[in-house]
Amino acid sequence: MKRFSSILIANRGEIAVRIARTAQRLGYRVIAVYSDADVSAPHVQLADDAVRIGASAPRDSYLNAASIIAAAQHSGAGAVHPGYGFLAENAEFAQAVVDAGLIWIGPPPSAIRAMGDKAQAKRLMKVAEVPCVPGYDGDAQDEATLRAEGQRIGFPLMIKATAGGGGRGMRLVESAAAFDAHLSSARSEAQAAFGDSTVLLERAIVQPRHVEIQIFADSHGNVVHLGERDCSVQRRHQKVIEEAPSPALAGSDGAQLRRRMGAMAVAAARAITYCGAGTIECLLDASGEYYFMEMNTRLQVEHPVTEALTGYDLVEWQLRVAQGEVLPECSQDEILRRFESGGHAVEVRLCAEDPWHGFLPQSGRLLAWQPGTAVRVDHALEARAEVPPYYDSMVAKFVSHGTDRDAASSALAEALRTAVVLGMQTNQAFLAACLQHPTFVSGEATTGFIAAHGDELLRGTPPMRASLAAMVLYASEALRMGNDPMHIALALPWARPMRFALDGEAIEAKIETFKPNRYRVACGAATEDFTVTRCREDGLTVTSSAGRESIAWAFDEDRLFVSQHGRQTILDDQTLTGTVGGAASNTGAVRAPMAGRLVAMYVSNGQTVEKGTPLLVLEAMKMEHPAIAPMDAVVTRVCFEEGAQVTAGALLIELTAAP
């Protein structure tokens, strides 16, 4: 087999950094690729060489197979590692890499092709006697056939796009009456996402666990499994938390089930002459029956969980297998010994999204990033860098490893509570709430966990109270002006009125002091006393009747971004100007909720609009976000033209209330 000494990583973000670090440790020359949005991204800075592959949009860069192969040839790369996402499971791209005389660090294109079509994959698995969910995976796709097959299978059932993944083209059908509407919706979504409206039907396994088996194979006929990962905590079929071992596979009975599922996964890999890293995803019901769902023919996002338990570097395994070497460990008994004596590991996916506003994707400038050192954090972030709106919302992975499940999950929850992420909202606090929920703590979470407890999880981190926000805003501005809120010289007690916006909501308050570090804040009829015990450039600590509270902060021009328990709040002091800006308030200012492109501007200067009138459409994170007039008003200023790129929080339109 042809050997290589340089690797082009056909990806970006945390996985590109992750692969590069192992490759460089092993002595390989690493070549990064980048789009216009990633010119100075961490994965580019880390690499030994870097090649531009196109504009910011994925279709022009990270999905541009021809440009990536040209970059590999131009840079003298000997091999291509696809990471995950983008082109990682594209059989045509894998074949094009091989045809270009390069080494593909992944499974054979034939295996990717075989498992990329869910219907074909199920047929292959049935031949290999791998248990599959009862259903229909035939070629006939007319509505009458699918409707009849649905009746035969029974309800509830799942409709799934055969060409896709990530929850797209997937619908749960509860009854025959709802079948036609869900079929039409699933087909339409599948066609838009994958260019293929073909679907399969499966009996719905109610409230299952999602358990996957990590497999590895080499070109010498060796195939092993490295235990399971439990990925049951999901939102809209997207994984949120992954852990190993699975709580469902505890004790001696669990160990036996692990071996049966592992043997099934190895048989599945052998059935398609597999080579490299792969994952067999299964549904596990309450009785212990398991069913093949799909195979991911790549390295998984959650591979660090397996690494933590076994001590193996799975990227290193990929590189050695691609070089034609034998698997670093071929003894299944030794692998299971490591796995079962390795304690417990839990991973969460940190995403730039706002859980309190429908998980709206976020982008923009990262003002502060302090992930801490208590747990493993895979990321490609740095303070003051841009998080572009063009790519997946996952920006980091927090991975905790402990002697047992309680130790690992508790350490992870604490790491999330203390990490500082400012500049955009994330799901940081939501993840911590998931880890601390009694259902998760007891090990009983299934795929329905978030759907069942979503509102409760969101209530776990309430908005910052107005009195604390006023204290924080005053202290930060005093420090900015050279005054120390802990040691202010007092000739006489004083009081100061304040007007500010708290996440766009207008707040009026009064703050007064009687001692150098003691303050009283009044908001309406309510008052609260604070003692400032620490105040530095990056935040403060106060004590009050609510206890001891630590707040992190960072300024972006005149707006203050603050974080408490992982939830971000934006404070805008309007004491002197008398106006409070907010995209959803009646204050006369429409701001961008995230960075993006103005694809439509419907109004012009001087135009009169009624409440509810469409004003503009912002495109970000592959979604369109309209803005409407919050009141009857006159447009006093349009700040950007259609087609402009805007940053998060940018003032887009100024309005004056209609007389």
Image: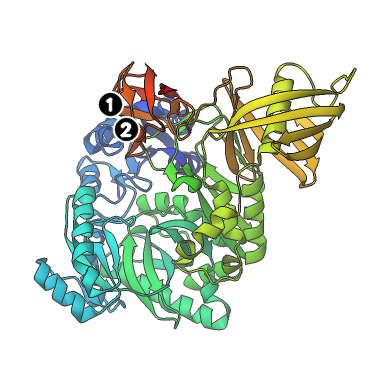
x and y percentages locating residue 9 in the rendered image: 37, 39
Circle 2: element type: loop
- Mark identifier at residue 613: 2
Q: Specify whether 359 is left or right of 78.
A: right
Q: Indicate the colouring scheme.
A: rainbow
- Regarding residue 539, the answer to whether it shows in the image is no
As drawn, is 536 to the left or to the right of 53? Answer: right
- Numbered mark located on residue 472 in the image: none
Which residue is at a point 20% across and 75% down the rendered structure image? 150
- For the C terminus, the quadrant is top left
Callout 1: 10 Å neighbours few (<14), some, many (20+)? few
Specify which label sits upstream in the sequence, 1 or 2.
Answer: 1
Residue sitting farthest toward the front: 659
Q: Is residue 138 above or below residue 628?
A: below
Numbered mark located on residue 602 in the image = 1
Q: Is residue 577 above or below residue 444?
A: above
Residue found at x 33% / y 52%: 106
Q: Nearer the viewer, residue 638 or 163?
A: 638
Q: Position of residue 472 (x, y in %)?
A: 70, 32
Residue 400 lies, in percent from the top left, at: 60, 55
Residue 458 percent coordinates (x, y): 54, 53
Q: What amino acid type is highlighted by mark number 2?
A: Thr
User: In the figure, residue 4 lies in which quadrant?
Assistant: top left
Pick whichever, 478 or 389, lies toward us: 478
Q: Nearer the viewer, residue 310 or 373?
A: 373
Q: Are marks 1 and 2 in contact (CB under 8 Å)?
A: yes
The amino acid on which the numbered mark 1 sits, given as a three-letter code, is Tyr
Residue 388 visible, this orientation: yes
